Image (cartoon, rainbow, N blue to C red):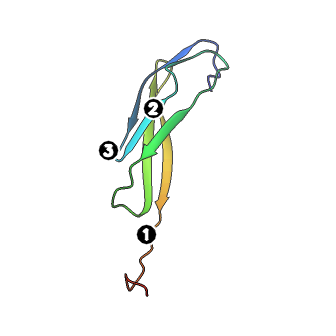
Amino acid sequence: RNTGDKPVTIRSVQTNCDCLAAATDKTTYQPGEAGLITARFTVGDRYGLYQRAVTVVTDDGPPQKLSVAIEVAEPALVTPRQLE
């Protein structure tokens, strides 16, 4: 949310891992306006707990760092692989 009294433009949204992509719903927010940052985590062969960061750079003040915690459960294994 833009709590200031002038428009704020988001210059970039950066993540600290190739497995995480992030984007905003728009680039400029008027005073009082709120928006969304959407992050997408690519699971691949990963499982366990992951701590990632999203850094938002604006034209108003220092970059803001957001923390993301993701827990990926290990897939269930059924043995034997064949059931009769």
Task: Give the quadrant of residue 31.
Answer: top right
Q: What is the quadrant of the C terminus in the image?
A: bottom left
Q: Element under label 2?
A: strand
Q: Residue at x 62, y 22 (%)?
A: 2
Instruction: Identify the mark at residue 23; answer none if there is no mark.
Output: 2
Q: Which residue is mark 1?
A: 75
Q: Nearer the viewer, residue 24 or 5?
A: 24
Q: Residue at x 41, y 77 (%)?
A: 77
The disc labelled 3 sits on which kind of residue?
Answer: Asp
**Closer mark to the observer between disc 3 and disc 1:** 1
x, y percent for residue 65: 47, 38
Number of dots carrying numbers = 3
Q: Which residue is mark 3?
A: 18
Q: Does residue 78 lie above or below 26 as drawn?
A: below
The disc labelled 1 sits on which kind of residue?
Answer: Pro
Q: Nearer the viewer, residue 58 or 71?
A: 71
Density class for disc 1 (Cα within 10 Å; few <14, some 14-19, many ≥20) is few
x, y percent for residue 37: 52, 34
Q: Element under label 3?
A: loop
Q: Does residue 60 lie above or below 18 as drawn?
A: above
Mark 3 vs 2, N-terminal side: 3
Q: Does residue 18 lie above or below 34 as drawn?
A: below
Q: CA distance from mark 3 to mark 1?
A: 22 Å
Please say whether residue 63 is visible from this viewpoint: no
Query: In this rendering, would 28 be left or right of 46?
Result: right
Mark 1 vs 2, N-terminal side: 2
Please say whether residue 58 is visible from this viewpoint: yes
